[in-house]
Structures are given as structure tokens and as C-alpha cells.
Amino acid sequence: MSELTNLTIVGARDLLAKGEISSKELTEAHIVAVEAARPLNAFITETPEKALEMARASDTRRAAGEAGILEGLPIGMKDLFCTEGVLTTAASHILDGFHPTYESTVSRNMWDAGAVLLGKTNLDEFAMGSSNMTSFYGGVENPWRRSGDNRPLVPGGSSGGSATAVAARCALGATGTDTGGSIRQPAAFCGIVGMKPTYGRCSRWGIVAFASSLDQAGPMARSVQDTAILLRAMAGYDAKDSTSVNVAVPDYEAAMTGDVKGMKIGIPKEYRVDGMAGEIDQLWQQGIKWLEEAGAEAVEISLPHTRYALPTYYIISPAEASSNLARYDGVRYGLREEGATLDQMYEATRGKGFGAEVQRRVLIGTYVLSAGYYDAYYNKARKVRSLIAGDFAKAYEKVDAILTPTAPSPAFGMGDKMDDPIAMYLNDVFTVPASLAGLPGISIPAGLSAEGLPLGLQLLGKAFDEETVFKVAGVLEAAAAFEAKPAFLAA
Ligand code: GLN
């Protein structure tokens, strides 16, 4: 870890602005770090030459007085965002050799703001997973270790490559996408900050689709302010995405006033789930105390349909996925296996191109959408989804934000839970409800488990009120003063 790679985005931005460092120097230091971290497998594609070219162009722009809000900052891009001319895989075999001829709106926004691409980060195949173990390119290793135990742990998923890259100081920040928790849970497992904005805040155009009514892009970085800076550049209305919402993007940094006096923070009683580790509950209580000490008031609330959130999510998301993934037919993209007939070619291509988890979801999705079961499963799930959204709407009549743990456990071992999909799906128990309701949420590293692993607290906000989320998160972050660093950096 060099001094340059240990900077926050705020710190790097200041040094760049003062002319004390160049984007070229900053980028070179990160390219070295990306190479040194190869054993973690955080990147599917490294783009060092492109990075240096972008850094030089950035230094030229700055010299001409044209610095954007991410000017010269090297970042990782989850390999679910289409990047023009740069291999885009969604961590799937089926997208072999896919070089998009277009750029996703979010990545385009970031390059327009001056950011530099270090590479495409690893993820669960098509963003389906909570461990990053379903990637065709192999699992990602969490840079953290349990104390006195060198067994490798998962970084969480699906944005596990981005979380590892940021935690291991390979990138100042990275993008993630969150369908049911894929930004917040890996952020918690890797001891960084991850923010899922309101559905519709960032354009989905050019992001490989998983479940279109849930997918949302967001930033991952090492401080709340850093994620606020990234989100401002990523967000914005886009006519190319019909679900993108035409509202102004506020200055999220300016919202971080540190003042939460008199604010009401909801504590949902249904989130006290069975089997949750005692240390997670303790951290949650600690979080409540921190906010009370800062002058906020904790209010118990009820989100009565919480227990239906996971089953609802695991009907709606596979249903949408089965439809979205129908386009991978061996004709239009990537892999193609031969077959005597067209149907056999489809079958052979999809059978080989999709991994086991993706196939499971396509099967579940096809089943819940089939003629005889559509009403019993899919339509029922849609109704329950609106009840869940209604729970939040009611709660937000009384409170400004909601505090919960991010995940029910710290990072687990690589290979654990692989033969038990239900145990794997339980990772999302605290993140999925807000996804179904389309609400913004952030995970902040707030403490360490007894075994020395990072634990996250989650703050949820009202639709399009990311400002309050950032404000409260900043206060929580200051109180938690999380300074611990992953074992990988000491090695
Ligand atoms: N773990 C959840 C799933 O597997 C969420 C994934 C995500 O948010 N992309 O569906």
C-alpha cells in the first residue's frame, strides 16, 4: 500500500487540485496495486494502458482549467456495466468476447466527470449471488482474515470484486449494482461504504440486466463523503432509460452537515431475526446510541411484511431474470455451441454458457411465470411487494431514516453455503426489503466481530432523499471511527 493508494477520494482530489500530484502518478500507483492484488481476483479485466491514457488526458484538462468532479481519480467498474471497446462479461461464460460498441450511461457520466478506468471488477455471474463465488472467472477473495486464521473468506456479492478492490487499496472507489443487496452486503463484508440510491436515480441503460424493476447502480468507496462524490457524478436523468426519474441531482457532499439533532430514526422491530449473531445486535444497539448522542431520537417502528420480503424477492427477481436472459441465445452475443437444429443450438449454448446458479434462477423464473402458476406466484409476489413498500411509506410518516444491521453475519469462508441456496439467500434478509420498495440505503463499516471481521450498519431513507441518508451516515461514520485495515495490506 503506497501513500497514494491509501488516500480517500477527498484526499486525492485535494492533492490533485493543489497540483501536488498528477493523475498520472496517482493512476500509476493504483496500477501497481492492482497487479500486487492479483491473487485476490478482484478484476476480470485490467485496463492499465487505457488508464494511463485517460490519466494523461485528465492532467491535460486540469492544466487547461477544466476539472470535472471526478477529475483524475482512478476507479474500478463492475463488469456488469457495458464499456465501449472493453471486454464486458457479467462474469458469465455466455458473454465470451463481448466488446460493447456503446458505453453505459453511468460509466459515461463518470468518464465525463474525469474518472479513470483501472479495469472491470469481478462479480457473481449476472450479479446473482451473495458471495462472488458464482463468477465464471472464479471467486474473489476478501482481503480480510479472521484473527489468527488464514482461511480465505468471501467478499460478499454480487459486487465482490469492487468491494475487494476498494478495501485492498487497488482503487479509490468503484461502481456496484444492487438488486437485492449487492452493493451493501459486500461493502459490509469488506469494511467499506456502499450506497444503493433510489430506484430511478441512476440510469440502467447499458448495464447488463438482471431484474429490471430492482437493479440500481451505486458507488462503493472508503468513506461516506467519497460515495457522495461518486454518486453525484453517476446519477441523473437519462431519456434512454424509461425508469430513470427526471429530478435534479443534489450536491450530496453539501448535505453532510453533521447535524442530526431532532431527527427521528426508525428501528424496525421485525429486523430482530432469529439466529442473528449477538454481536450484530450489539452493534445495532451501539449505532442507536451513537445517533442518540448526536441528538437524534430513536423510534421503534413496525414493518410488518418484512418476513415476506425474501420469498417475494426470490419470485420477482428470477421471473425478471428469466425474461432478461432470454436474449443470450448463441446468435447475438458471445458463446455459441453447435447443434443440429436451432433449438439444439440454443440448448447447447445456454447449457454451457450459464453456470448452475443462473440456470437455477432461469428455471425458477420460468416456473413462476408459467401459465398455470403466474397468478399463484408472480402476481401474488407483486401484491406483497406493494404491501412491503406500503410498510415503509407508513413508517416514513413518523421517521426520517431507518437504522438496521446490513447483514446477519460477517464474511464467511470461500465455499461455505454453496450447497445450501436458502442459507445463501438469507444474507439478503436486511437489504432486500428496501430493494423491493425502491428506497435508498447505505452500509457503513461500524465495528469488528469477535473474530476481527468488519460489520456494517445500514441506513435507509425515503425515496429520492439520499441527502438525509448521507447526512446521518456521516454522523454514524464519525462516531464509529472505523480505522481497522484488512490483513492483506499488512502482508
Ligand atoms: N444476493 C442477491 C441475489 O443473489 C442480490 C444480488 C444483487 O443485488 N445483485 O439475488
Image (tube, rainbow, N blue to C red):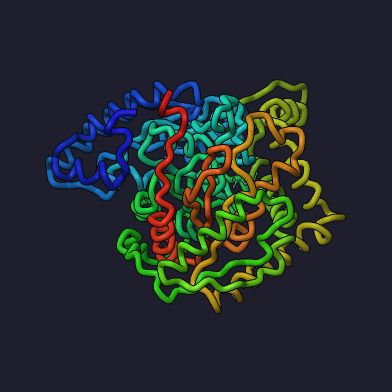
In the figure, is residue 9 to the left or right of 324?
left
In the figure, is residue 144 to the left or right of 481?
right
Q: Position of residue 15 (x, y in %)?
A: 19, 41
User: Up-down: is 459 above or below 173?
Assistant: below
Q: Nearer the viewer, residue 182 or 405?
A: 405
Q: Nearer the viewer, residue 138 or 379?
A: 138
User: Up-down: is 155 above or below 447?
Assistant: above
Q: Nearer the viewer, residue 376 or 285?
A: 285
- Rendered residue at 37%/66% (across/down): 248
- Rendered residue at 73%/65% (across/down): 384
User: Up-down: is 132 above or below 227?
Assistant: above
**Which quadrant does the C terminus fall into?**
top left
Q: Position of residue 121 (x, y in %)?
A: 48, 33
In the figure, is residue 157 to the left or right of 422?
left
- Rendered residue at 80%/57% (across/down): 377
How many marks the image carries: the answer is: 0
In terms of image quadrants, where is residue 153? top right
Q: Which residue, as the protein is rendered here, is positioned at the far bottom?
A: 397
| Residue 179 at least partly seen | no
- Rendered residue at 81%/51% (across/down): 370
Q: Position of residue 7 (x, y in %)?
A: 30, 39
